[in-house]
Amino acid sequence: MISTAKADALIAEAYAAQNRTHPTERLPLAQAVGRILDVDVVADRDQPPFHRVAMDGIALALPGDSAPLPARVRLDGRLWPGISTPEGPARPAPGNAIEVMTGAALPEPWNTVIPVEDLTEDREDNGDYRTIRSGTRIVPGMNIHVRASDYRQGDPLFSRGTVITPPHIHVLASVGWDPVPVVAMPRIALVSTGDELVPVRETPLPHQIRMSNLPAIEACLAAARLPVGSTTHLPDDPDALHAGLRAALAAHDVVITSGGVSKGSRDFLPATLEALGCVRVFHGVAHKPGKPLWFGVAETGALVFALPGNPVSSLVCFVRYVSPLLRCWGRPYDGAGPFTLPLAGDTTAHPSFTLFLPASRARRPDGSPTIGPRKSAGSGNFAGLVPSDGFVEIPAGAGTLSAGTPVPFFPWTL
């Protein structure tokens, strides 16, 4: 069996070796957060495209020198967002001002904005005046978002491969990218195996159980906004497995199976996959639970993760190995990249196997986060996972890890 680090490296290597060109899809801008940008984006105009008023107040046309300003100014007109010229005279009278609002396009020669917080309204003398608060600091250019100060037309903004976040949406909208080209999601097939399994809505016979691995993995994919192309349940029969897996491999980029990968006399999955032309990359990883994990590459280029059938093993292996790769689809991938949290108490490692222990997050008295693992109740006891937030990875041969030691933490959902 190989180590977890070796499994990570082999998965990353197989993913990179496919050298596939990912298809592109175009999404409405509001749906693109979390997706991978599939185009280089450049600015189609200056941003802002005009001298933008940054605060409500009044605008003055100040000379370049430090000539004193009157404490009281008359308003000659008004300027609000969405109009090209002020309501009023085209040129300001000496010492006079115009009322302005945030977002307006400020034309020359007005070049300074004094916010309303520094003004007092005065309507005496049959006019509209504003008194400037004593001590207000006034310099040319203040409270103006200068044209092209964010970026200029033709500037590169984002490169292909960027993960889109809400701030990216602002910029993409400003340069007209709607819909936005993104890397298409992988086509994912889920295959559950086992004669003892029946669908969730059926009443099982005394010797049967309802399938839970497939719904749990499908729920994880849904939480990550990864659509499932097909779901299939296959019996422990070589011919049925051959036909079902052949169809899944032909039509999908990633095939995730559950069950039939151990060393039992009816564990037909590894041999069936290899008979279908899949190249085995590894079979067996030195961790508990989930030792029988199988990973390979189909002739079509599809990546195949054959997870153990025990529910805890299946879910842990999916979260540990499959989910990180799928979330990185369309970008370089170099491993799982977990969170790290300090242990809440002393934890003893296994001498030969990496341990995946269910764990719950907590807070120290000072408010800092910590993680508290507990002993696994077995790879078949999925109910024992319920009061946990995820699992920690305790490396093989590490002896006793003292409280406060940082360890990798994999949450069930991100």
Image: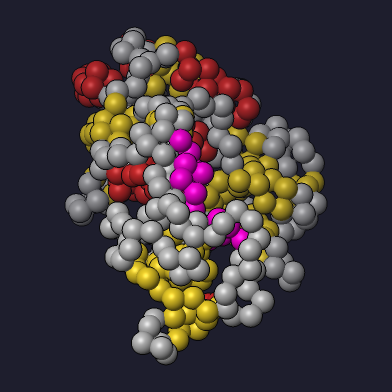
User: Is 209 rendered above or below residue 163?
Assistant: below
Instruction: Give the residue displayed 56% in from the left and 57% down from the top.
Output: 63
User: Is 288 rendered above or below residue 247?
Assistant: below
Instruction: Give the residue displayed 54% in from the left and 60% down from the top.
Output: 62
- Front-most of residues 337 and 279: 337
Q: Residue 311 appears in which quarter of the rendering?
A: top left
Quadrant where the N terminus lies? top right
According to the image, what is the colour scheme of the structure?
secondary structure
User: Is 16 rendered above or below residue 147?
Assistant: above
Image x and y of residue 137, in percent: 64, 69
Left or right, 285 with respect to 129, comes to right
Q: Main secondary structure of the magenta part?
A: loop
Instruction: Give the residue displayed 63% in from the left and 68% down from the top.
Output: 68
Image x and y of residue 128, in percent: 39, 81
Instruction: Give the residue displayed 71% in from the left and 54% down from the top.
Output: 343
Image x and y of residue 409, in percent: 61, 47
Report the magenta residues as a range. 139-152
Left or right, 102 with respect to 400, comes to left
User: Is 332 rendered above or below residue 82?
Assistant: above
